[in-house]
Image (cartoon, helix red, strand yellow):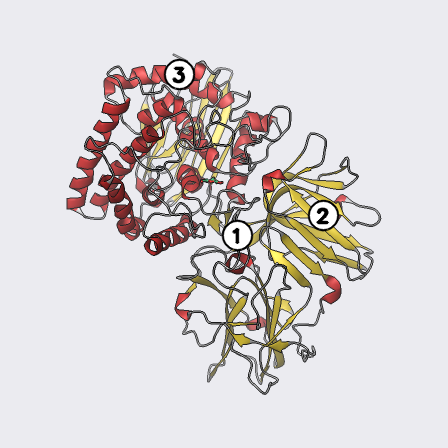
Amino acid sequence: MPTWQGQFISHSRACAESDPAPYFRRPFFVEDRPRRATLYVTALGIVDPYLNGSRIGDQVLAPGWTSYRERLMVSEYDVTELIHTGHNVLGAIVGEGWAVGALTWSKVNHHYADRPALYMQLELDHTDRAHTIVTEPSTAPWKLSDWRVGTQGVRANGLYDGETFDARLESPTWCDPDFDDREWGPAIHYHWDLDTLRLATAPPIRRIEHLPAVAVTTSPAGHRIIDFGQNIAGWTHLSIDTPRRGQDILIRHAEALTPEGSLERETNRTAQATDRYICAGADHEEWEPRFTFHGFRYIEVEGWKGALDLSNFSAVVVHSDMARHGWFESSHALLDQFHSNVVWSMRSNFVGIPTDCPQRDERLGWTGDLNAFIPTATYLYDVQAVVESWLTDLMIERERVGNMPRSAPLVDPRPSQPTALWGDAIVNVPWTLYQESGQVDVLRRCWAAMRSYVDEVESSLDESGLWNTGFQYGDWCDPDAPPREPGQGKTDKYLVAQAFYARTTAQMASIATLVGDTDAARHYTDLAARVRAAFQGAYVDPRGVVAGETSTGYALAICFDLLEPEQVEYAGKRLNSVMAGRQFTISSGFAGTPFIADALTKTGHLDGAYALLMQTQCPSFLYPVTMGATTIWERWDAILPDGRLHRTGMTSLNHYALGAVADWIHRVVGGLSSAAPGWSRILVAPQPGGGLTHASTSHITPLGLAGVSWAVEEDEMRIRVIVPPGASADVRLPWHAESPTIAVGPGEHEWAYPVCRQ
Ligand code: BGC
């Protein structure tokens, strides 16, 4: 890491709502071109760096969101090609971002800083000498080579509310040497501890894709509405032919339309999600915002003059630039769309940190959402660096506030108590990363934090080992919970807590062994047994009936191994009949839903699992797909069959948590799963059903590509398997007369045999 030699700079007054963004510039002279020029840049806010009028790099929304008081990420760029001999100008625009702007439903701003502030360090390496230019306050009297601050086109910006840009006020030369900055003011020192600066480790946020507009309609109020065909996180790119000077264009973003065809803006809650562009009056103008992002599929356009063509608009998809690692497709169009919706909700919610949703006044790193989704996330994308960065913040915040926060970075001032699914993310998330990578380091790094959470819960158990006091989210967003009380699902919340704590303590016993703490391994093994026994004692009758007879109660008991072998079969039967009693619609929330299909499969009710998967009645996995969903909703019935939004206030249409069921789809429908940490052993065990005639899935494991593809044609089953170098696989051939398990090594393998459905 370089030695930081500069200071943060800003303008002289605290930022009020809707303030123009500060533009910074600093001229410098170079006698001969350096061998190498490296720029380090970060900001309290969102920074767009420039050199000699050129935007540097392709990162957007940098430095992303971390626990800034402890770690503020610095971007590093090779700018050698942009340096000229003679006069040069280094510049930057800094928006409010997470550090300065309003966050959460409370709309409180200034969480980290009261104004946008910039840090830059340009290192010019001339072989025989080195020269460094850094941000520092202007001198008095003013010198030509001082930093100056002014305002230009960006008139207002907020992550939730949007950006206003007045092109009449933007000089194209503001970052050129001959720009006259005498009207700009001095830069002042902004106090910020340079020890917080870190070189970024996670992939940056980038524009990943441009989606064309697919349709234009007119709302009942006469506004033109553009449909991009896909719900995303990002923004709109405008391309305006023959704009008039001063023409004021408003772009409002929304995820859905009302049945009447107006924008449905309720899912944004208080986020205005409105960008405004005031034209300069050039022959042709192009614009997109840089200091905001929206969760949207539709835009409403106001102030457009003349013909409006679909080619005037595109949607810019923005997220952390992670490598895609997992794929699935099948013979069932709705199922494929469902899987695509899971992928899109993941993409929309990995904008720097893993969040709940990209559209409303939250976009927070909620622990419970990622805890539910992490097995699916690690399959679909290489999330290691993004999630490890977020875990670092989670642990920092825990240290700071003295308990396990429910979101990180933490700006929600409400004190936290240990809570199942949310709190134990500190154990299950690193555990899942370890399962994927086979690298123990992440467990070591999180070990102390894991222990503190698990030990805190242990201290609140009653004498029988039950966790039955304190706040719990329970089976959050159970469709049967009262509309405005998503935490009041029908499954006893302490049953949910006990089940998760049993899983967590069992994981702790394994982790303790892996990190080499034998005393702790013994302790957590005993604790896990005690917690499991308490679950049995309080919630399970001798036959295997789980208290309350809810699908979540059964699924957790079965999947977390909380039943005796002789109870499992009966519990599976009961689960299947509970589900059949509801025609296999969903009656579970965040805690239970990821496990229902698995529990049915494990107990021999594969048909029930497929009935659940293929159901299209509300609420079900495929119901939103039949309603045109292109992402996973916060609740399966967020839009009701009459096309109206459920009036619960919990109706984000882009929440990945319930997409967690894709993990079962990969393992059971596709048939690919890891049988040892790091995928050194693989289980290939597709279990066809649901009328599917074909499915395939593949995953880039740490050892290389693994894949399974199966197809049934005229009663012949064909299976193709790819095993990466260094791995071995156990292949269980489905619908085979002898049900063999075949051990194979690296390479491609293929089988074809007559289907035997016994
Ligand atoms: C979020 C959830 C989150 C929950 C917990 C909600 O508003 O969107 O996904 O986990 O709050 O309180």
Position of 665 with respect to 27 (left or right) is left
Residue that carries the numbered disc 1 in the rendered image: 103
Asked if the residue under mark 2 is in contact with the one under mark 3, i.e. CB atoms within 8 Å, the reply is: no
Where is residue 184 drawn, in percent x and y?
65, 76
Residue 18, by quadrant, is bottom right
Please tell me whether residue 662 is drawn above or below residue 583 in the rendered image.
below
- The answer to whether residue 689 shows anywhere in this view is no
Position of 119 with respect to 217 (left or right) is left
Q: Could you give the CA–CA distance between mark 3 and mark 1, rounded to whole angstroms?
A: 43 Å
The amino acid beneath tag 1 is: Leu
Q: Residue at x 17, y 41 (%)?
A: 523
Q: Between disc 3 and disc 2, whose residue precedes?
A: 2
Where is residue 362 drawn, in percent x and y?
52, 46
Q: Residue at x 57, y 28 (%)?
A: 624
- The answer to whether residue 617 shows anywhere in this view is yes
Position of 374 with respect to 213 (left or right) is left
Q: Could you give the CA–CA distance between mark 3 and mark 2, rounded to whole angstroms?
A: 49 Å
Residue that carries the numbered disc 2 in the rendered image: 313
Where is residue 591 drawn, in percent x and y?
40, 32
Q: Say which mark, if any, is on residue 608.
A: none
Q: Between disc 3 and disc 1, whose residue precedes?
A: 1
Residue that carries the numbered disc 3 in the rendered image: 576
Mark 2 residue's CB less than 8 Å from ligand 1: no
Where is residue 588 drawn, in percent x and y?
44, 26
663 or 69: nearer the eye? 69
